[in-house]
Image (cartoon, helix red, strand yellow):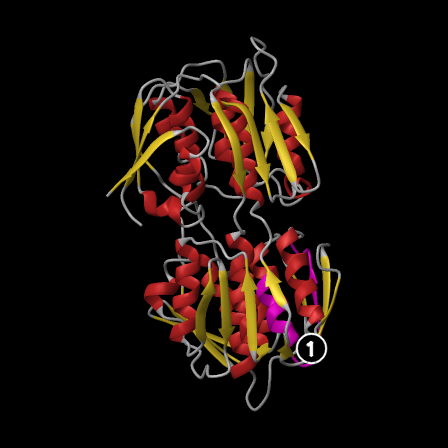
Amino acid sequence: MKGEFYIIGNSGEKTLSGKVVISGAKNDMVNAFAASLLMKGDLFVRNVPDVSDTEAMAALLSSLGGSVKRTATHEYKLNTGACAGSNLRGDIAKSIRASILYAGPLLARFGLVSFPFPGGCVIGKRPIDLFISGFMKMGARVSEKDGIFSIRAPRGGNIRGASIFFKRQSVTATETFMLAAVCADGTTVIKNAACEPEIAHLAEFLNSCGARIKGAGTSMIEIAGTGLLSAGKKIYDILPDRVEAGSFAILGALAARSLTIERCIPAHFEALIEALIEAGVDIKAGENTLVVRNSKRGRPFRAVDVKTHEYPGFATDLQAPMAVFLTQAEGEAIVFETIFEGRLGYVGELIRMGADILPLDQHRIQIKGGTELKGREVESPDLRAGLAYIIAAIVAKGDSVVHNAHYIDRGYERIEERLRAIGVKIERKP
């Protein structure tokens, strides 16, 4: 789905209401598709988000010889028994960074994998040095020619268990080596591992299928190699998208009388919830729901400083939507992006919309809140900034056009339909 979004702003009025049901997390979907390469027989996956990243992961698995069947809305049956190749198609792999998740299980299963430098949104350098060094520690040989990396297991053998220390936490690297280690010889220990809920969820499912993984969800994970697994009749239920839920919470605070967010796990985005509460937002969190109300009429939100951090800290994927929130809060706030060096590239368009934002350096901005945003025509630079622009356009006075809808489609299912259901005036144009 290409095109652009046309949004009629509500001039900051809190008129939206209703409920939003959160989709499955694309960041967990990619784990399920990669895990299918470790399974003997069928793997059934449920709550799969209908987004373009799902299409890309499905197409890539099919190109390897896997069977990908959509059995119902948001449900897939995957079978990789017929997979024979281990070359990741460049045109698909370059469109989605998570394609590198296939590298670990393919190397462990076939002893060889080749892939181009993975793509995705342009939000700063996202090097693959952790992957290369990790595979080498597992005994693999690495070569690169014309932008294609080739990874081979040791001659006449399988990759070996190893002690792998990440010099920086990486979600994708943690998941990749956890998957690879399931079919490696011996035991692998991942140190300074990422702790995101999607990692623990993947490990829990793999263990239910016969894997032996300890410590997932902590900074040290131990995996004993067991070989291929069997899902049997088990179903991989994709987690609710915590980034989508958090983004709707921000939208509810800015523009809703009352917004109920259903099928979410508030404990997974607690850092955002606490920041919004500190700013004066009325939020009630349950086990699987979140309610945002605006009953304190005339009382402005307060500015709060934000510093992104690995989980369970403030998620980098929620940084841009939170910056929009801070343009409407009274006082000054500093936003400090510590994960990606290019993630503040969206700021210029918000300034054009009337935001009072001062870039301090490559990683920090100062926001003076309480400013009126004005509708503009803006270009989405990436997935998360694209949704932030939609939120800004909803709050703004006048009409806005948000280009590059395809970025937003990567991670948000039928976003315009769901926004219209709660009162947003938004249309997609080709």
Vertical comparison of 307 with 300: above or below: below
| Residue 193 part of the magenta-drawn span | yes
Which segment did they paint magenta? 175-194
Q: Quadrant of the C terminus?
A: top left
Q: Is residue 113 left or right of residue 45?
A: left
Q: Is residue 202 left or right of residue 220?
A: left
| Residue 77 part of the magenta-drawn span | no
Rendered residue at 33%/69% (across/down): 146
Residue marked by disc 1: 225
Residue 1 image offset from top left, x and y in percent: 31, 50
Q: Is residue 368 left or right of residue 184?
A: left
Among the 4 quarters of the image, the one containing residue 32: bottom right
Q: Given the image, on which type of amino acid does mark 1 rest?
A: Gly
Vertical comparison of 344 with 370: above or below: below
The residue lying toward the viewer, choosing from 192 and 255, is 255
Vertical comparison of 65 with 319: above or below: below
The residue lying toward the viewer, choosing from 14 and 3, is 14
Residue 374 image offset from top left, x and y in percent: 34, 19
Q: Is residue 140 visible?
A: no
Q: Helix, strand, or loop for circle 1? A: loop
Residue 248 image offset from top left, x and y in percent: 52, 34
Residue 201 image offset from top left, x and y in percent: 66, 58
Among the 4 quarters of the image, the one containing residue 97: bottom left
Rendered residue at 50%/70% (across/down): 77
